[in-house]
Amino acid sequence: MQRVAVVGASGYTGVELLRLLSRHPATQLVSVTSRQYAGQSVGEVFPSLQGSLDLVFEDVDPARLADRADLVFTAVPHQAAMEMIPALLEAGCRVVDLSADFRIRSQAVYEEWYQAHTAPELLAEAVYGLPELFRKEIPAARLIANPGCYPTSVALALAPLLEGRLIDPATIIVDSKSGTSGAGRAAKVDSLYCEVNEGFKAYGLPRHRHTPEIEQTLGQLAGRDVTISFTPHLLPVNRGILSTCYASLGAPLTLDALHSLYRKRYAGETFVRVLQQGRLPNISQVRGSNFCDIGLALDERTGRVVVLAAIDNLVKGAAGQAVQNMNLMLALPETTGLLIPPVFP
Amino acid sequence: MQRVAVVGASGYTGVELLRLLSRHPATQLVSVTSRQYAGQSVGEVFPSLQGSLDLVFEDVDPARLADRADLVFTAVPHQAAMEMIPALLEAGCRVVDLSADFRIRSQAVYEEWYQAHTAPELLAEAVYGLPELFRKEIPAARLIANPGCYPTSVALALAPLLEGRLIDPATIIVDSKSGTSGAGRAAKVDSLYCEVNEGFKAYGLPRHRHTPEIEQTLGQLAGRDVTISFTPHLLPVNRGILSTCYASLGAPLTLDALHSLYRKRYAGETFVRVLQQGRLPNISQVRGSNFCDIGLALDERTGRVVVLAAIDNLVKGAAGQAVQNMNLMLALPETTGLLIPPVFP
Amino acid sequence: MQRVAVVGASGYTGVELLRLLSRHPATQLVSVTSRQYAGQSVGEVFPSLQGSLDLVFEDVDPARLADRADLVFTAVPHQAAMEMIPALLEAGCRVVDLSADFRIRSQAVYEEWYQAHTAPELLAEAVYGLPELFRKEIPAARLIANPGCYPTSVALALAPLLEGRLIDPATIIVDSKSGTSGAGRAAKVDSLYCEVNEGFKAYGLPRHRHTPEIEQTLGQLAGRDVTISFTPHLLPVNRGILSTCYASLGAPLTLDALHSLYRKRYAGETFVRVLQQGRLPNISQVRGSNFCDIGLALDERTGRVVVLAAIDNLVKGAAGQAVQNMNLMLALPETTGLLIPPVFP
Amino acid sequence: MQRVAVVGASGYTGVELLRLLSRHPATQLVSVTSRQYAGQSVGEVFPSLQGSLDLVFEDVDPARLADRADLVFTAVPHQAAMEMIPALLEAGCRVVDLSADFRIRSQAVYEEWYQAHTAPELLAEAVYGLPELFRKEIPAARLIANPGCYPTSVALALAPLLEGRLIDPATIIVDSKSGTSGAGRAAKVDSLYCEVNEGFKAYGLPRHRHTPEIEQTLGQLAGRDVTISFTPHLLPVNRGILSTCYASLGAPLTLDALHSLYRKRYAGETFVRVLQQGRLPNISQVRGSNFCDIGLALDERTGRVVVLAAIDNLVKGAAGQAVQNMNLMLALPETTGLLIPPVFP
């Protein structure tokens, strides 16, 4: 049984990782760390996990971790991740990093959208862990950059069209909506119940930090530079992302052909569910699961295709995908511990 | 004091009209009708209005209505409206129709998106009642087609750009999100609490019925035919529409210039609030009010402008705009009874 | 036109007071203060009020306030209120205090449940401003202690039974549920959207601070000491309190008799709506209004009466009641500016 | 591998049963029936289960079912259950019935609160399936009456006190609050999103149908007749019940002693989590799981104990408990397929 640890398990992504790992049949969770909660039991901090996980939060200590765990998930904010990961790697751990620090391949682009990078030497080595699109390099990777939530939904939505050179990349517009857990568990007025409930707004315009990550992936799929319009919105729900993606078709295509394309592309992909023609995805139907549901529409009047992708931002958009990457790294069946049906209603 | 009546006051738009009219200082509500609730008091059917409105629902009888009311609001479904309105007009009533039946000027277009029209002779006479854009014809109108909720938000969002010929109309994409009251009060599984709550989805793709209404208005503003992509989504909130509108600029423009344009266009318009630069609208800030909040963003990387408009779908998107039209028709100050600050939180 | 000011208008009670005062026809709001927001316009801090209230937040300065306002609302936390109010009174202002500082008549009881009292000399003078129960002393008062939200709902629910000596006060159990705006606008993890949404819990057991205030009022109505069990719960809604109150009847009573009693007791009280027999109150039907809806049930099997009262915690439970008190103090009709129908849905 | 079937799997309890059975490692789900959906695949009707359950809804046919399944869950409304179950038993199936039809032991009491009983001969045989309280008879039972959601929460909350004769049963008051999935998936105006959202109300007063079931269980635990006050309320959440139970202690007790009592009573019960002293349960912490969380408070001023119990109404309150009963009936470990950590947030 392989040993794993979670660093920074105090936010919503952290508790979701613990939920998934607590029931993972082929690994043992040996340590969870959190500066804020060191000394408290997991059940005290997250009553939902009482009885499911019998661990006490420890203070962060990369050196000690390496002795005890073969693989470490880093679920700390960007910048904190890049400061900690070199030591973990050096000590012999493999790392699945859930922050943004190693997702952008170009140091210059990273520094334009974030801040100075303190471990740029690892950027080339880090593998972008979106298995359905880039599975090959994951098993041997030492450092996985676990994709962002918005980028996961958009990449899976548009990959078949870009790989097939069927749309004009310059026309891509992505209108995304995310549940509030994406804003994290920090105490901010903007995230208060009464500020979010019965509300809806866009934010981060015109330059949300997920934009370069999305563009990097779409560019790779398209084989050319891609610049998109991306507008994130805040939904009054706990979990879920729906990305509505628009693009102009290069040449006319039937809805049937479109569906065939997607079904073929994602045949054998357990976690991507291409919906029947006429069906559109709803975030409520993927809640708590690692599924990405994809729906398609064709507007013949405008020549545009509309692709809609729904994921649970904490699962396929974060913790679930991290476990999927771990499974590949540890040579386990990719779906181990992840065949969890969604919780509806 | 002018006498008004409401026909079909049993849904969410109906109860909202009653709320607004119950406090309107310059008109008297003399009759409310509903087949379903005839004989019951308003307070029994809508406990919220107990103590505010002392009326009993009557059965619908156009002839009797005309004796008692100078102006009638028809808040019945499309098709029912066109069957009833000719008789009301003939009997001498003026009508504000909240259905879709007289919004589309072309009978052919109406019949393509809805069904056969039984009163096409009135299509030319009906005035599209969006005061901020088409105020001039409203005061003298006998029949007002009160605009749809989505179309109101989109028209106010894009009018300054189209009037100024600043965007390419062929590039317009509208991604709208509406609260659930827009789906009406009919007992349908799709509208049940557990189906909507913690969910989010698009619907009506690729041909939602509000599309031709939006295109008609945008076309009028642009002075040419306009075909758009329009995607409505269902939000887990009671009230509110946010429309995120994308278009490519014809020529580069600064955000300052964009803001000046909007401020100038809507100067003097009490119900349109152009937000400060850097601010984006939130449906929670217009709840219960007749305001339309507009925010602007410019994406220099793509040359696209993003205009976001938030309204309360039941107020500026329906009952409030209907009262605004009534005020104009009755030569009252346009804001009479509508200067209601939003309810937040 | 009388001049009023609001001190500490930065929380949810504050913005609600501003909403109500902005439309109050017989007073002029001359100043709003907030340490946190001094220098910013009301519309910047509360976008909902843009266009409805053209004021800039000032720093707090009791002396200057007294020159400009006849009556001041203090909407600051307890302890801060008692430090500021003596100076305001001395400077000649009349005060409606929305904090808990002057609600408890006994200094000892106050200090047992809160902390040391620094202005105990005012406790005897302060008038508990629940007009439906204690209207007489309000008009002449210099200092009004505006009741708490839970206590308002409970007092109105049980007053007719206690005044009529119809229940055994020792058997009173109050199970209350409040919307999240009652927790204030401070940035706390416990009030985050994801912590509250889809959740429900009791809190503050077994000694919530509203207990002595409730007991004081019930005791006054009963003419004897009353000790109750009180359990507050947190509801995932923005606004509203529902209090479910249980008590054993001293002697058998029919539901008809019970209804007569309540209708008679509250005849002429605009803001108390005793529901028809068989109807139970819903917080959604009082939202945004100053109404208190009361429903009654009788359990013959146990000899207990159940009284349910619904209010909007920010209106009848805070800002609306404060305005109602102001109206009485300024010799205005008591309902001035408060005849606002609830916003449903 | 034992074969099981679900009859009437078209509501929220049905889809929850399918979710749990789809991942149950020791049984095989061979048939799901639904009059309404016969011929459609499970994934079409419940998109959440696409990819997790590859079955087509069949029409109901008890005789055919018996050939194929050893154990049948009946998830149909009361009355429909009693009409179908005798045939299933006769054909040799064992049955876990999720309706109310066999929960009340006395035909007279059943008929007082429901309607005529058509299979009274089975009332004596049916075993009330609340394992933590009545485990012994379950393994050998042919017919399990799966407890109601409210009754489960109340019985687990009060059992230790009643078994220990520590409270006066005549003083029990139960104030319960349930999520909206408890109202079922039927298309009713009262269950519409806009009717429930931002609302809260009591219902079913003074005689909700779960009352006799609760009283029967409490009476059995107390060894005497028990009559309670029970008030159910409707919460604007999908899932969860919180029951706040009040009772007067027979003799003084410390909170420590109370906690010891509960810990001891539920030691070894995987699905009952007695919270640490000072902690109160939140429905959000049991969502999607079979846990019942219990919190305790003692009010020395009134001599009352307050016990709060939180469950997921669809899991421990319905489908999860049904699977727990099935495990016992099939001689499987009781927790098989049910060690699912709650989904938070």
Image: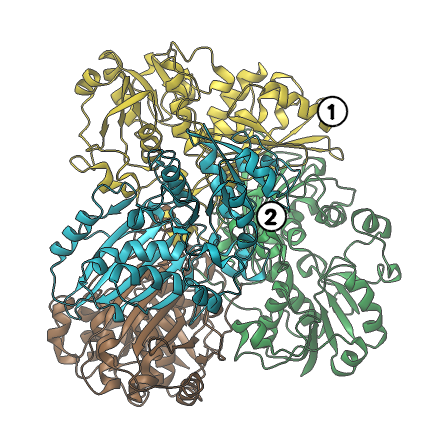
Chain colours: A yellow, B green, C brown, D cyan
Looking at the rendered structure, the secondary structure element under dot 2 is helix
- Same chain letter for marks 1 and 2: no
Q: Position of residue A291 (x, y in %)?
A: 50, 30
Q: Amino acid at mark 2?
A: Leu
Looking at the rendered structure, the secondary structure element under dot 1 is loop
10 Å neighbourhood of mark 1: few (<14), some, or many (≥20)? Answer: some
Q: Amino acid at mark 1?
A: Leu
Residue contact at pointers 1 and 2, CB within 8 angstroms = no
- Looking at the rendering, in which quadrant would you find the N terminus of chain D? top left
Q: Position of residue B313 (x, y in %)?
A: 60, 57
Q: Position of residue A214 (x, y in %)?
A: 50, 25
Residue denoted by label 2: B261
What residue is rendered at 18% in x and 75% in y? C86
Count of number-bearing discs: 2
Image quadrant assignment for residue B88: bottom right
Residue A186 in view? yes
The front one of D228 and B278 is D228
Report the chain holding disc 2.
B
Residue denoted by label 1: A253
Q: Position of residue C24 (x, y in %)?
A: 45, 76
For marks 1 and 2, give the one nearer the viewer.
Answer: 1
The front one of A345 and C272 is A345
